[in-house]
């Protein structure tokens, strides 16, 4: 795609090595290289991995980085109301996470912490859309009991991974479940779970444990700030039962009508909708992944794009409204400006 963007564009695979095991399901779905140590694909990414210049950035079929294409014509890609509210930021990062190994206990800072300590505009609130999950597998979401920074720092310093994992509130997940994970909340995901993740456009992770993972947490686990400082970003009190319930939906990924997948609390950060078998989407920047079927994307301007299972594509605002048929598609979009105003 060259010139003014006006059509949906397929995204090549963007799978790369990481510190935990996985990746074969991503390779099978997206045609990437698979595992055993490529457990993530970043889709429609305009941000790079923390501390790196290029890794993680999505490339368009013509060889340009999506980041550079958006910067060259932000109005066409994002639309005037988005640019007025957010500038050239897409406000969105979409990932596939294929876990052959449990994800370690970790957390992400919020916007205020990121601004104060890292001079960044975004923290890392995220949401998981569970694509596959073994029977009985689950996630850890927040501490089960109130902790203190001193106690957590002691566990981290002594590398007591078992105690940190036991400290989390556990919740079983099934395919079609969605979970919003607010910044600051410690969390982990069991091995065998396969998720589509939406998040703020950063790569800010704080590791609380790392035994058995291919990473040096002493060096790389604290964003270069040191654990005594970075633990200020941690939520120490548990999520109340009503809070936890408000973060989770059993949205389902097949059948029914077009629907919102995430809890309404996500609207200030990102939006995700399922188009089961087809549906129509209003104009606006979007990153989409086809979960099943064979069909076509059509824009109101007359552009047509064949798309089948595993296809990922990006849609610029200038394409106008668009529709798909014959496929189950998850459409990921930035927040509406009015919803983002109060999002911490």
Image (cartoon, grey):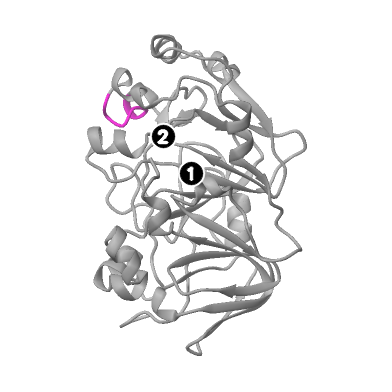
At x 39%, y 51%, the residue is 340
Q: Which residues are magenta?
A: 219-225
Residue 219 occupies quadrant: top left
The residue singled out by tag 1 in the image is 126
Q: Report x, y in % for residue 190.
A: 63, 33
**What secondary structure characterizes most of the magenta part?**
loop
Label at residue 150: none
Nearest the viewer among 149 and 337 is 337
Q: Is residue 147 above or below residue 65?
A: above
Q: CA distance from mark 2 to mark 1?
A: 9 Å
Tell me the element at label 2.
loop
Q: Are marks 2 and 1 in contact (CB under 8 Å)?
A: yes
At x 31%, y 71%, the residue is 80
Q: Is residue 250 left or right of residue 109?
A: right
The residue singled out by tag 2 in the image is 108
Q: Report x, y in % for residue 334.
A: 43, 59
Nearest the viewer among 41 and 315 is 315
Does 111 appear in magenta?
Answer: no
């Amino acid at each position: 795609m060259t010139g003014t963007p006006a059509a949906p564009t397929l995204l090549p695979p963007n799978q790369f090595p990481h510190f935990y095991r996985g990746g074969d399901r991503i390779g099978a779905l997206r045609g990437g290289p698979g595992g055993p140590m490529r457990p993530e694909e970043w889709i429609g990414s305009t941000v790079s991995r923390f501390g790196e210049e290029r890794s993680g950035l999505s490339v368009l079929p013509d060889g340009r980085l999506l980041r550079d294409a958006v910067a060259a014509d932000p109005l066409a890609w994002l639309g005037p109301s988005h640019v007025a509210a957010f500038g050239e930021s897409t406000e969105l990062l979409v990932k596939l996470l294929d876990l052959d190994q449990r994800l370690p206990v970790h957390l992400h800072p919020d916007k205020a912490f990121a601004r104060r300590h890292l001079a960044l505009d975004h923290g890392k609130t995220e949401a998981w859309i569970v694509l596959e999950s073994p029977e009985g597998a689950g996630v850890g979401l927040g501490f089960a009991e109130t902790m203190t920074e001193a106690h957590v720092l002691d566990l981290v310093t002594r590398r007591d991974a078992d105690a940190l994992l036991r400290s989390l509130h556990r919740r079983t997940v099934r395919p079609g479940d969605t979970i919003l994970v607010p910044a600051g909340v410690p969390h982990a995901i069991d091995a065998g779970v396969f998720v589509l993740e939406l998040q703020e456009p950063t790569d800010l992770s704080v590791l609380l444990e790392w035994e058995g993972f291919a990473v040096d947490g002493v060096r790389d686990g604290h964003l270069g700030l040191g654990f005594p400082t970075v633990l200020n970003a941690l939520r120490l009190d548990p999520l109340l039962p009503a809070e936890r319930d408000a973060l989770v939906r059993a949205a389902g990924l097949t059948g029914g009508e077009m629907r919102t997948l995430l809890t309404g609390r996500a609207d200030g950060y990102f939006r995700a909708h399922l188009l089961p078998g087809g549906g129509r989407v209003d104009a606006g920047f979007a990153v989409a992944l086809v979960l099943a079927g064979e069909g076509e994307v059509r824009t109101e301007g007359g552009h047509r794009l064949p798309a089948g299972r595993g296809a990922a594509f990006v849609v610029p605002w200038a394409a106008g409204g668009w529709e798909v048929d014959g496929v189950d598609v998850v459409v990921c979009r930035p927040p509406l400006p009015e919803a983002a105003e109060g999002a911490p």
